[in-house]
Amino acid sequence: MFKPLALSVVVFLVGTPIGVAAPAVPPSGKPPATASEKADASSPDWMTFYYTHPQPDRFVSEVRGMSKSAVLSKPSAEPPIVAFLSRVMAKNPERIPAWMAALADLPDKDKETLHKAIWYSDTDAGKAYLKKHGLAKYLEKPASDILKMEIDSPSVLDMLWGYFFATGDDAPIRRIVSALNYGKYAGALERYKTSKKTADDKKQAYYDVICRAAIWSLAANCRQHPRVKGICEKLSEGKDLNPTETRWLTFVLAKLDPGTETRNGASSGQWLEDSKKSAEKEWMKSDRGFGAMLLFSDNPQQFLDNWEKPTAGVKLPTTESAPRGKPCGAFVVFAGCGADARGLADVVADLTVIKPDGKVYGEQKGVEVWQKKPAPQGKTLQLGVGQLGIVIEPNDPTGTYEIRAKVNDRVKGVMLELKRKFSVSK
């Protein structure tokens, strides 16, 4: 019997939300600095909250600290750093020569990052410095305007965040919100796995990635920066956004509201159903703030499409029976997973299907649920990345099958064993 499950009223209570830290400089993965190193270490707060209290006098010491921690020339960190430093330089162009003289002993690769920042600053003093020091290659074309760059990769989003951290301006946030237009490609990344992998399939999947990055970064920085939240609320209430941007930005802001029953919960480490505490079930368990559900659907594509819709709640097509010859899917939905020192999750699952006679019908071990990605914060429910596809063949036995999932949060050290049954008729 077809049985839709409304996740708008099934939520998880996951403990006191952890403050989202979305540093402008990605973590280096190195141990904390020793006392002797701290004098030369950069402070993430200098960048991340610079716009609240500009301190250009710390430019040399902070950049030197970035260099010492191997962040300054790190490819993944370069976009936000270049954009950030370019805006600090643009506000203090007369100090560029002195700053560069004080940093003349940095490694060449680190100075190259600074040269890019000078170019992006698009200042007369910066151009004069580049020309004087034999760096005319940077002057062969006009400096790019960060606010007008096409958002064709997550790195452009990083540059826009770097721009904001330096200035606190509305404009970079508005540009980041424009990336929500890629929301029309929602689900393309999952569909790519089973697509013909054409150039268009790849493009749509990449647009989906960019949109997800925009959603995550907006939500994370709204939590950390009242200024970002205020700008987003103003945009959502105004008339400047198109319908797609408005819909997705409303979705982002709704995720921040602890009173919103979307994919969210409250704060004590258990499930709620219809706003009431729910006893654990074979397919829905929690431990130490980590919770997981095992869901089964005979319409996996509709399941995925419904999950991606930017609505306050989501109805997912689940079932307790499986038709023969039709693809079905087992899904893991989770909340409250742990985060390692870099803020990343590590959740995997072993998925097994047992036949009516007790023998294994099929299994997949070590399926990614959520790995090497920022851990969803607070009360957010998240659909796991990997799914188990099931097709009951004509000659397969009738009776009751059982899906077993061992969901392992390796960071928290929690293992949840879930079960879900479905029947197969003749």
Image (tube, rainbow, N blue to C red):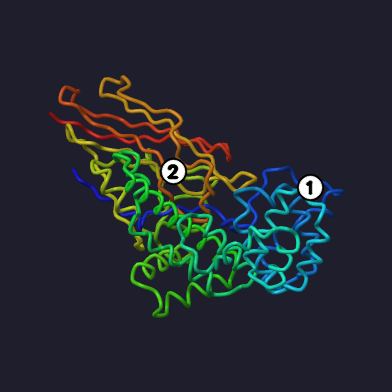
The residue lying toward the viewer, choosing from 13 and 86, is 86
Q: Amino acid at mark 2?
A: Ala
Looking at the picture, how far across and down is residue 185, in whole percent? 34, 55
- Find residue 203 and name its label: none
Q: Secondary structure at mark 1?
A: loop
Residue 297, above or below 392? below
Query: Is 426 on the left or on the right of 307, as rendered?
Result: left
Farthest residue to the left: give it.
426
> What residue sits right under mark 2 in the picture?
292
Q: First in sequence: mark 1 or mark 2?
A: 1
Residue 324 in sight from this viewpoint: yes
Check contact, mark 1 vs mark 2: CB within 8 A.
Answer: no
Task: Determine the image quadrant of residue 159.
Answer: bottom right
Crowd rating for badge 2 (residues with CA inside 10 Å; few <14, some 14–19, many 20+): many
View extreme (bottom): residue: 239
Q: Nearer the viewer, mark 1 or mark 2?
A: 1
Q: Nearer the viewer, residue 297 or 400?
A: 297
Residue 20, quarter of the rendered image = bottom right
Name the side, left or right, on which 351 lies relative to 35. Answer: left
Residue 409 rendering spot, x and y as whole percentages: 52, 39
Task: Count neighbours of disc 1 (C-alpha within 10 A) and say few if under 14, some if 14 to 19, many if 20 or more.
Answer: few
The answer to whether residue 46 of the structure is visible from this angle is no
Q: Residue at the spot x=37%, y=59% of the render?
A: 183
Q: Is residue 324 above or below residue 192?
A: above
Position of the N terminus, as image quadrant, is top left
Instruction: Residue at 46%, 30% (x, y): give it.
Output: 366
Pointer 1 residue: 33
Q: Is residue 48 left or right of residue 212?
A: right
Relative horizontal placement of residue 52, taking residue 225 as reference (left or right): right
Between marks 1 and 2, how big is the CA–CA gap? Answer: 36 Å
Q: Amino acid at mark 1?
A: Ala
Between 158 and 103, the one lying in front of the other is 103
